[in-house]
Amino acid sequence: MGIYNIIRSEEDCPCCKKKSEMYFQFKTACSSSAACLTVFSVGDTMPWLSPSHKFYSTMLDLVDDADLEIASDGTIIEHAYGECISCKKELRGKVAIKDLKILSLTSIEPNPDWPDNNGPL
Ligand SMILES: [Zn+2]
């Protein structure tokens, strides 16, 4: 299913060592019935249901358990997969989200899980 949100950021690439534009895909607060494929930046707050809505917690339904960590303060940490625009290498990183606000994109490293010609974007 090609349903995900996108975070765009300029980061130091661990492969080509340049400060590069990067796009990572993640699935928190993404659903087939809401707008998806939205490009966000660090600091953005994502649209979603209000916290009192009975389906509020479904914001994580599309996130693979293996890609999800929940910090003790409730911060969602999703392992995101992406690409460096400069060198086209596949990367992975961690997107931290608290109360639907994208706090950070960290831990960017080469993604060992994908063959070179099978990127996410
Ligand atoms: Zn690069």
Image: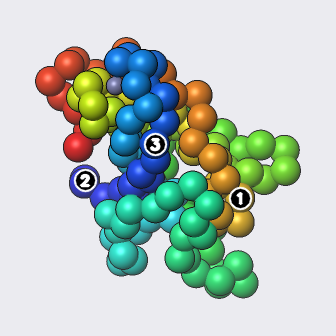
Asked if disc 3 and disc 2 are in contact, CB closer than 8 Å, the reply is: no
- In this rendering, position of residue 51 left or right of residue 36: right
Q: Residue at x 63, y 47 (%)?
A: 104
Going from the N terminus, do you reach mark 2 or mark 1 first? 2
Going from the N terminus, do you reach mark 1 or mark 3 first? 3
The residue tagged 2 is: 1
| Amino acid on which disc 2 is placed | Met
| Amino acid on which disc 3 is placed | Glu
- Camera-near label (2 vs 1) is 1
Of residues 86 and 100, the one drawn nearer to the viewer in this rendering: 86
Q: Which mark is residue 98?
A: 1
The residue tagged 3 is: 10
Q: Is residue 67 visible?
A: no
Q: Give the image quarter of residue 45.
A: bottom right
Of residues 55 and 40, the one drawn nearer to the viewer in this rendering: 40
Element under disc 2: loop
Classify the position of the C terminus by image quarter: top left
Query: Farthest residue toward the right?
Result: 73
Q: CA distance from mark 1 to mark 3?
A: 21 Å
Q: Residue at x 50, y 58 (%)?
A: 41
- In this rendering, position of residue 120 left or right of residue 41: left
Label 2: few (<14), some (14–19) or many (≥20) C-alpha neighbours in 10 Å: few
Q: CA distance from mark 3 to mark 2?
A: 27 Å
Of residues 91 and 21, the one drawn nearer to the viewer in this rendering: 21
